[in-house]
Image (cartoon, grey):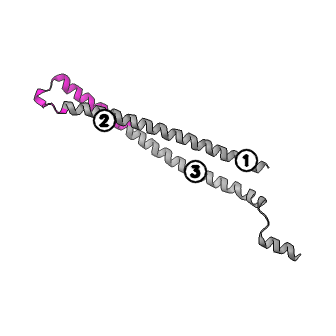
Amino acid sequence: MPEEIELEMAKIQRLREVLVRRESELRFMMDDIQLCKDIMNLKQELQSLVAIPEKEKTKMEKQREDELIQKIHRLVQKRDFLVDDAEVERLREKEEDREMAEFLRTKLKPIDKSTQSPTSEEKTENFQS
């Protein structure tokens, strides 16, 4: 029946969306892990420079310290943006899920009614006739 085909197509589309979302989540996780690694590496280098007494630091070491602080700051901002973007995406997906559930509910009702066996009331009415 056309209704069943349409329902099956909606289910396939939904599965496709779930897979695309999962791929997006995995990419986010990979980006997040890489940013965290980069931040940790820069922090370790910065700690080694901070451990040097201020009087003993060369001009190059002071310059490198400033560069590291700026790089860490940029990476933290990038990660914050990534996390915020992921939250917006999660909320959008939640709304899509709600809309899809409503769509499927409205599509399933007509099919359920046409495929259900007569209710006990209908059987009683038919029997009494």
Examine the structure image and report whether residue 62 is included in the region drawn in magenta: yes
Looking at the rendered structure, which numbered label has been put on residue 97? 3
Relative to the observer, which residue lies in front, 29 or 62? Answer: 29
The residue at which mark 1 appears reads as: 6
**Tag 2's secondary structure?**
helix
Q: Secondary structure at mark 1?
A: helix
- Residue segment shown in magenta: 50-78
Q: Which residue is mark 2?
A: 40
Query: Mark 1 or 3 closer to N-term?
Result: 1
Quadrant housing residue 70: top left
- Where in the figure is residue 8, as x and y percent of width and height? 70, 47
| Amino acid identity at mark 2 | Met
> Along the horizontal axis of the image, is 35 left or right of 70?
right
- Is any part of residue 33 visible from this angle? yes
Mark 2: give few (<14), some (14-19) or many (20+) Cα within 10 Å: few
Residue 129 picture location, percent across and down? 89, 75
- Give me the C-alpha separation between circle 2 and circle 1: 51 Å
Q: Amino acid at mark 3?
A: Asp
User: Is residue 71 within the magenta segment?
Assistant: yes
Question: Is 100 situated above or below 122?
Answer: above
Q: State the SS at label 3.
A: helix
Report the residue that reaches farthest toward the bottom: 128
Crowding near pointer 1: few (<14 within 10 Å), some, many (20+)?
few
CA separation in Å, label 3 and label 2: 37 Å
Q: Are marks 3 and 2 in contact (CB under 8 Å)?
A: no
Q: CA distance from mark 1 to mark 3?
A: 18 Å
Q: Examine the rendering and report whether any part of residue 74 can be seen.
A: no
